[in-house]
Image: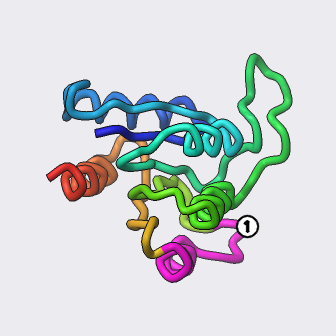
């Protein structure tokens, strides 16, 4: 099974990757990591993925060695789902976020979840609330992987 992680926070990405490596062998899951909207969308257009783990707030471009990474995208994950639908790119997408609210508190994760389920119901499979040091996100991520792995 092949997965794509689109996440710019290195600590969060490392914890997700470490968790998957502890629970699945490389022969079970091959995971590719990208750090921005642009590098993530390019990879989606290059390859087919069984699942995508997607951060909602990501920079437009990869930030390398302190260089400017372009405009922050508060809804970069939603923008990726929009492009996937537009170009008929199929995958199981799970949002992994550490925020309860977006856009300065104007939209809650529950409201965003409802919006994404309506607009992208063939792609979007829900969200996991990530909090370092807690295991609930791990349980929910494992549940998601197991639903598509079996």
**Residue 118 spot, x, y in % from top left:** 51, 82
| Residue 133 lies within the magenta run | no
Q: Which residues are magenta?
A: 102-120
Please provide percent x and percent y for residue 100: 54, 65
- Work out whether 26 lies above or below 71: above
- Residue at image location 45% in from the left, 65% down from the top: 123
Q: How many marks?
A: 1
Residue 28 position, x and y percent, is 21, 33
Q: Is residue 116 left or right of residue 134?
A: right
Q: Left or right: where does residue 101 sit relative to residue 72?
A: left
Residue lying at 56% horizontally and 74% vertically, measured from the top left? 112
The residue wearing badge 1 is 103
Q: Is residue 111 magenta?
A: yes
Residue located at (58% from left, 36% from top): 9
The quadrant of the picture occupied by the N terminus is top left
Task: Tell me if residue 129 comes above or below residue 134 in the rendering.
Answer: below
When asked about the image quadrant of residue 14, the answer is top left
Few, some or many residues within 10 Å of mark 1 (<14, 14–19, 20+): few
Residue furthest toward the top? Answer: 65
Q: Position of residue 71 (x, y in %)?
A: 84, 46
Residue for point 57% across, 66% down? 85
């Amino acid at each position: 099974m092949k997965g794509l992680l689109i996440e710019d926070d290195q600590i969060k990405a490392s914890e997700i990757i470490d968790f998957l490596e502890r629970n699945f062998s490389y022969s079970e899951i091959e995971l590719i990591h990208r750090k921005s909207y642009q590098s993530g969308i390019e990879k989606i257009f290059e390859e087919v993925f069984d699942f995508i783990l997607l951060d909602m707030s990501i920079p437009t471009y990869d930030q390398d060695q302190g260089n400017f990474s372009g405009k922050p995208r508060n809804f970069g994950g939603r923008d990726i789902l929009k492009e996937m639908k537009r170009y008929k790119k199929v995958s199981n997408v799970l949002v992994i976020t550490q925020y309860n609210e977006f856009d300065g508190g104007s939209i809650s994760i529950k409201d965003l979840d409802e919006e994404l389920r309506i607009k992208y119901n063939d792609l979007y499979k829900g969200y996991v609330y990530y909090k370092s040091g807690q295991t609930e996100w791990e349980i929910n991520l494992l549940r998601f992987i197991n639903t598509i792995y079996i």
